[in-house]
Amino acid sequence: MDARGWSYSDLERQSDGALSRGRWQQLGSGVEQKRFPDPASLLVIARVLDVDITTVVLAAAQAVGLSVTPVGGDLAHLLPPGTDRLSERMRDAILMVIRAGVADLPDRHGERGDQQSLEWPKSAAPSRRHRNGPAPASDDHGK
């Protein structure tokens, strides 16, 4: 809500009245809920907030008092809405950076993983490429 500057009334309008302003406020209060939302409400929440249904279901489970521990750490929850629309190439590039970042970290038992290091040839680096293809092979930089 804060990121979009929305009020509970805005959420009601965005849901085409499927969830009232009061219901949005109840859900957003952080107070433990007595009942798990019905499937139709869960779908509305996911659509309006532009998040996947799994995120909404897990949040609803927490709201009714279930202890829910997300798998894979907190990084997935930090991703902004719309990341599901990234191209496959962009997603793979982001995953490669993340994998490289965690490749040398110890696992939960303090042991280093068997992950191979990722190599990126200098000739493929963005700073080495030109608009119309790879950089020239010579090191004279056009002299």
Image (cartoon, rainbow, N blue to C red):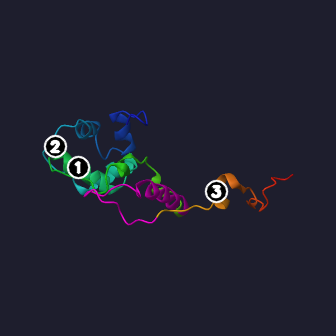
Q: Amino acid at mark 1?
A: Ala
- Return the disc, 1 or 2, that comes first in the chain's sequence: 2
**Residue at numbered disc 2:** 33
Q: Position of residue 13 (x, y in %)?
A: 38, 40
Report which residue position mark 1 lands on. Answer: 60
**Front one among 35 and 76:** 76
The answer for how far apart the CA atoms under marks 3 and 1 are is: 44 Å
Neighbourhood count class around disc 1 (C-alpha, 10 Å): few under 14, some 14–19, many 20 upward: many
Q: Amino acid at mark 2?
A: Gln
The residue tagged 3 is: 125
Residue 47: give x, y in percent of width and height: 38, 51
Q: Could you say which quadrant of the image residue 14 lies in?
A: top left
Q: Could you tell me which residue is drawn at 78 percent across and 56 percent down?
A: 139
Spatial CA span between label 1 and label 2: 8 Å
Residue 136 position within the rendered picture, expressed as x and y whole percent measured from the top left: 78, 60
- Residue at 54% from the left image edge and 58% from the top image edge: 90
Tag of residue 140: none
| 88 is higher (above) or lower (below) than 30 | below
Q: Is residue 5 within the magenta segment?
A: no
Is the Cβ of the residue at disc 1 closer than 8 Å to that at disc 2? yes
